[in-house]
Amino acid sequence: MNWLGEFARRIGMLLHRDRVADELQEEIHLHLDLRRHEQVEAGVAATDAAAAARRRFGNPTLLRERSYTVWGWNWLETLTQDVMYGLRAMLRTPGITLVALLSLALGIGANTAIFSLMDAVMLRSLPVKDPQQLVMLGQGHASGITDSFGVTQLYSYPFYRQLQRQNQVFTDTAAVFSMSSDVHGFVLGRTTAEPIQAQLVSGTYFQTLGVQAAIGRVMSDQDDRIEGGNPIAVVSYGWWQKSLGGDPHILGKTLKIADTTYSIIGVAPPEFFGTTVGEAPDIWLPMSMVKSVPPYFNAYSDNFGEALEVIGRLKPGVSIAQATTNVNLLYQQILRNFRGGVLSQRDKDTLKKAYVPITSVATGLSGLRRQFSAPLMLLLSISGLVLLIACANIANLLLARSTVRSREFAVRQALGAQRSRLIRQLLTESLLVATAGGALGLAFAAGASRLLLRMISSGPEVLPLRVSVDGQMLLFTLAVTVTTALLFGTIPAFRATKLELTKSLKEGQGAVRVHGKSLLAKSLIVSQVTFSLLLVVAAGLFLRSLVNLNRVDTGFQRDGVLRVALDSTSMGFKVDDPRLQSRLREIEEHVRALPGVQAASFAFFVFHEGEWSGTITVPGAESHPDEDVVHDVVGDDYFKTLQIPVLAGRVFGPQDTATSPRVTIISAHTARTLFPKGSPLGRHYYFGGPSSKDEYEVVGIAADVKIGDLDEEPVAMDYVPANQHPTFLSDLMVRYTGDSGTVATAVQRAVHEVDRRIPITDVSTLDEWVARSITDQRVIAQLATFFGLLAIFLSAIGIYGLMSYVVSRRTNEIGIRMALGAERRQVRWLVMREILVLVAVGIALGVPAVLASSSIAQHMLFGVSGSNLANLLAASGVMLLIAALAGYLPARRASRVDPMVALRYE
Amino acid sequence: MPASRDEIPPGTLYLLILKTLARSGELHGFEIANSIQQISNDVLQVEEGSLYPALQRMLIKGWVTARWGTTAGNRRARYYQLTPAGRKQLVDEVSQFERVMGAIARVIQTT
C-alpha cells in the first residue's frame, strides 16, 4: 500500500508544517555556508565567495518554497489564508455581514420549512406497500354519516361488501370509517378511563395496504364477518409504547370501551399511522364492532348507513380509467338493488347524475390537505419571493462591497498579486457568506417547521404529523443562494481585477465607470421593490380578510360563554336509557346554581363541530328544496345561554316532554325558504322523505346563526328539544360573569359531583372555540404579514446600502456642487430623487403584477377583493415611505459633505 | 574550475541521487551535490538548490529517510539514507535509463 504510506507522510508533514519549513531553511543555510567556506579556503575573497556559493545554488527562497510545495498542501494553506482574510473582512463590516447572513438564513429557512410541511401534508407517500397502486372511491372530501340516496363520497358497509365481491379491477378492497372515534376506555383493567382514538376499519384494511404487524398479527377479513362477533384490537406502535409501556407480552391483554372488552391481537409497525395524514389512531377495531363503539352508529348492516371511505388496490396493469368504468357500472347496479329494483323518479334523476370518481390515495387521505394545500402553495410562493428579495440583497451588498474595494485590489495587483488569486479570494469570501447563511438557514428551518406545525394545529394538541426538514428543498434553496453569492461576488471580482491600475490608483475614489455597475445594482433595487409590493399587498389583503372574519356576526353572542365538551357516551348508558337524559338535566341544574353562572344548557352541536343534516318534507309545499336542513338537539336554556334572539313563538320549556307532541324551533332562513307564505308557527312538517311519519310542530323562529364556518351563507336549520330527542349530548354551554378560569373549574367540579365517570375532553371559551375555526386564515395572515415585513425590511436595507454606496462614490461631485453654491436641501433632494425614481419604477412594475395575481388568492379572501384599490394604494404608500426613510440617512450624509474635504480628496 | 560543465539530462536527477546514496550510504545535501560532481569528473553539474525539492519528493515517495546528525565540522545536518523501496526504485530507474540510452544510441549509430 504505497499510496497509503505516502498519504500518511503527507498528513504527518501537515501536522508539523512549521518544523519542516525550519528544517529546510537550516539545510539550505548549511549548504550555502559549506560552499562559501570551500571557496574561501580555495583563496577567493569573502564577499565573492558568498556570491559564488549563491550562484551555484540558485534562488534559495524560490527553492525553499518549491521544496515546501512538493508536499502538496499549498491549496489548503491558500484556502486557509483566504478564509481567514474573508472572516476578517466580514468582521470589519459587521452590519453588512449580519444582514447578508440573516437574509440568507431567513430565505433558506422559510422556504425549506414551508416546503417540509407541504411535503408532510401533501406530497409524502403513505408508508405502505406500493402506495401508488392504492385508489379510493370519491375524492375523500367528506366525513360523517348520511342516509341520502346516491352519494358518491361515502359508502355503506353492505356496498363495500358487494363491490369487493363483484369488482374486476382491485386485488384487495378495504373500507375505513370516515370518522375517527374519540372514546374513553379502561386499559388493562385500570380503574380510570383514558381517552383513546379508535379507528374502525374493515378486516381487509391491513392486507390491502400490505402492512404487517410488528408484534402478533393484524386483523383479517375473518375478524369482520359477524356483527359484534370479534371484539379484537390492533394497537398503534406509539400507543403501545406510551399507554402500554411497550409490554412485550401484550397479546391477549384487554381494554374495555363502553360495554365491550377487546382483546389485543397485534401491534402495528412504528411508521404506520393509518391512512389519514394528520391523524394517528391509537387502536384499530373491526367494522363489525361499530354498533358497540360510542356513539353506536348502525353502520354495519344498514344499506344506507353511508359513512365509509372505500379503498382499493389496483390489479397490475389496470388503469384508473378502467377502474372508474367498472366501479361506476357496479355502483348503479348495487344502488338499484338496495332499493329492491324499485326507483322513484327522484332516485332515477339522482342516479343518472351520480358519478364515482376514482382518485389516487398514494399520499393518504386528509382533511388537513383540503384545508391547507391552497394556503401552503400560496405561502410557498410568498416565501419564494422573499428568497428572491434576499438574493437581490446579497447581490447588492457584495456588489457594493467589492466596488468599494477596487482600490485595494489595484494596490494588491500592483504589488504582484495574481489576478486568479484575487478572484479566488473573492469567491472564497462569497462562499463563506453563503455557507454560513446556509447553516443558519438549516437551523432556522428546523425550528420554523416545528413552529408552523404548532400554528396549523388548531387545538391545544399538536397535530401528529412527521415533519422533517426536506433535504431536496434545502439543497435547492442552498443552490440558489450559493449561486447568487458566487455570481454577484465574482462579477465585480472580474471587473475589479481588470482595472487599469494606474488610473484607479491615481483617481482614488473618482467617479470612474460607476454607471455600469450601479445600473445592475439599481435594477436589483427595482425588482426588490416590485416583489415587496406584491408581498405587502398580500399581507394587507389577508389581514383585512382576517379582520372581516373576526367581525362576522355569528348570530350568537360569543363573549362570556364557556364550552365544556364532555364524553356522555362513557357514562355507561345506552342512548334510549331515560337515566342518561335525567343525569344530563341534573348537570344543567347543578351548574346553573353555581355563583357567576347565568345560564347553562347542553347542545348536540354548537359551531364548527360537524353537522347532522337531512331532508324534511313540508306538506303542501309546492317544490321540494334541494337543500338539506341542519338539525340540532338543544337543552331548554340554549337560546338564553347563547343569546340567540327568538324572533317569534316560544322557546322550549318543561311542557315539552318525551310524551308531549313533538315540537321544533326553525331558523329564520328555514322560515323564509320552506314556509314562504304565512306564519310558520303552528305548521307541521316531517323529518325525512315523503313517506315519513316523523312529525314536528313549529313553535318558534330563531335568528340565523353560523353553524359550520364563519364565511358560510345563512343555513336552513331547526332545533329540537333534548327531552324529546334522546342523544349523547356533548357540549355543555355555560353563560357566566367574572373570571372564566374560576367558573371553568367550578363547572368541572359540578359535573363530576353529578357523575364522576364523565370524561371532560375540552374546556374553552366560545370565543376561543370560534377563533380555532379560522386557524388556516389566521396562519396565512400571520405568515403573509411576517413575510411582508421581512420583504420591506430587506428592501429598505438594500436601498440604504445602494444609496450609501452611490453617495460615497459621488462625494467629489457633491463637493463641487456645494462649492459652486448648491444648498444642503438641494443636495439632499438630489439623492432622494434618485431613490424615489427607483421606487416609483418598482411600484409601476408591481401594480400590474398585483392585479394579475390577485385572482389566485381571491378564493382565500373573505369580504375583500384581491384587486382592492385602497389596499394597493396603502401598500404603495408604505413602500414609498420605507424607501424614503431608508434613503434619508445617506441623503443627509451627502448634504453634510464639507466641500473642502471632498475636493482635497481629489 | 573546468572550462565547461554539462547540465544533467532531465529526469535523471532522482537516478543520480539514488545511485550516490546507494554507493556512499548516508550523506547530507551538500555531500550529495559534491559527490555527483566529483564522480562525474566535474562534467555533470547539478544546480545545487534543485536537490532539495527532489529530496523532499523522495521523502514523500518513501525512497529515502532522513535523520539529523553532526558533520565533521560539528554542524547540524540532515543525513539521507536509502530505504528498501529506494533500492527497488534505483533498479527500476537504472533499467529504464539503459533502455532509453540504448535506444538513443541505436538511433545515433544508424547511419
Image (cartoon, coloured by chain):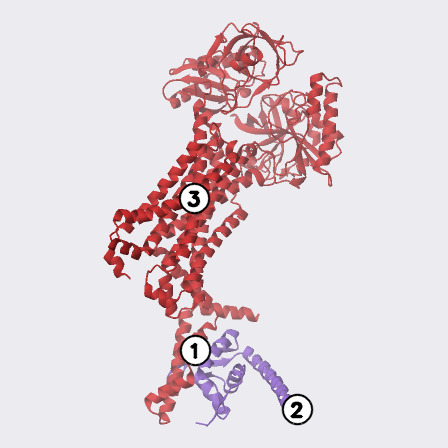
Residue A752's tag is none
Q: Residue furthest front?
A: A820
The residue that mark 1 highlights is: A63
Q: Residues within 10 Å of mark 1 (few under 14, many from 20)?
A: many
Callouts 1 and 2 close, C-beta under 8 Å: no
Q: Residues within 10 Å of mark 3 (few under 14, many from 20)?
A: many
Q: Which chain is red?
A: A
The amino acid sitting under disc 2 is Thr
Q: Position of residue A817 (x, y in %)?
A: 28, 54
In the depicted structure, whether residue A131 falls above or below residue A61: above
Q: Secondary structure at mark 1?
A: helix
Q: Position of residue B108 (x, y in %)?
A: 62, 90
Most foreground residue, A280 or A79: A79
Q: Position of residue A813 (x, y in %)?
A: 30, 56
In the depicted structure, whether residue A547 falls above or below residue B109: above
Do pointers 2 and 3 mark residues of a single chain? no
In the depicted structure, whether residue A200 falls above or below residue A62: above
Do pointers 1 and 2 mark residues of a single chain? no
Where does the C terminus of chain A fall, quadrant-wise? bottom left
* Chain identifier of the residue bearing label 2 in the image: B
The residue that mark 3 highlights is: A842
Q: Which chain is purple?
A: B
Callouts 3 and 1 close, C-beta under 8 Å: no
Q: Secondary structure at mark 3?
A: helix
Most foreground residue, A792 or A820: A820
The residue that mark 2 highlights is: B110
Residue at x-position 37% and y-position 83%: B75
